[in-house]
Amino acid sequence: MIEIKINLTSSDIEASFFKDGYEKLFFSPITKQYTISCIALGGISILTRTIFIFTNHIEKLSELFFIIFIIYIVLLVKQMFTLLKWKKSVKEYAVQNTKHNTSKLILSNEAFSFFSDEMEVIEKWSTVKRVELKENTVEIFASQDFIFFKSSMLEGEFTILKDFIRNHVSGIE
């Protein structure tokens, strides 16, 4: 049986979720396409409006680009609200999960147990649906989902956790 103390901080959780561009509002993977499209359509709309003002040509085309530009602005704002809502939920999750004074993970050959101030969960290795071992996190998907951060435990403990899981769960990603 192996016992690992977990010292989770909100910065651990936020660093894990707010990476790969998700920390950016305009150029996150969710909003980047709409931002680039809005910049391009806005430029084309301004260009066609300018040409129309000086030549009285391409009025319909100018209006069409402007309408498409407005539609993309609305879609961008919608995606931004979705991203902001997600960021807020991650921050709330981080605050909620760092309230625990003490957390520990106990690994045995049959199961793993997670204990915190107000929660005790025991999961048998046979009920684990999927495990993802990443450089800085271990994610376990079972009847409940768990994420363990490298920064919330000692370096050696994180290595022990990953090796232990490799030996007790098949089909690891």
Image (cartoon, helix red, strand yellow):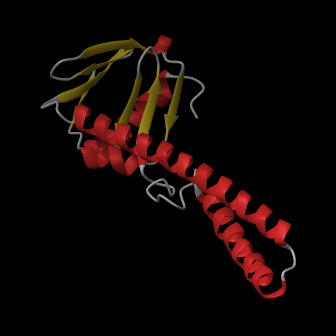
Q: Residue furthest front?
A: 56
Residue sitting at x 67%, y 70%: 42
Q: Quadrant of residue 55?
A: bottom right
Most extreme residue toward the right, as rendered? 57
Q: Residue, x 24% and y 39% (percent of image)? A: 8
For the C terminus, the image quarter is top right
Is residue 173 visible in this depiction of the protein? Answer: yes
Q: For the point 42% across and 41% down, which residue is it? A: 85
Residue 164 image offset from top left, x and y in percent: 41, 29
Judged left or right of residue 126, residue 16 is left
Q: Could you tell whether 121 is left or right of 130 in the image? A: left
Residue that extends furthest to the left in the rendered view of this protein? 101
In this rendering, is residue 118 above or below 66?
Answer: above
Vertical comparison of 48 with 67: above or below = below
Instruction: Tell me if residue 155 can be seen.
Output: no
Residue 144 occupies quadrant:
top left
Q: Position of residue 99 (x, y in %)?
A: 17, 33
The reply, left or right, for residue 140 in relation to residue 74 is left
Question: Eyeballing the image, is 91 above or below 27?
Answer: above
* Residue in the foreground of this view, choosing between 21 and 16: 21
Q: Image check: 125 left or right of 121?
A: right
Measured as percent of width and height from the top left, residue 31 is found at 58, 54
Q: How many marks?
A: 0
Hey, which residue is sitting farthest bottom in the picture? 54
User: On the rendered image, what quadrant is the N terminus found in?
Assistant: top left
Residue 78 screen position, x and y as percent: 55, 46
Residue at horizontal 56%, vertical 30%?
172
Residue toward you, 171 or 29:
29
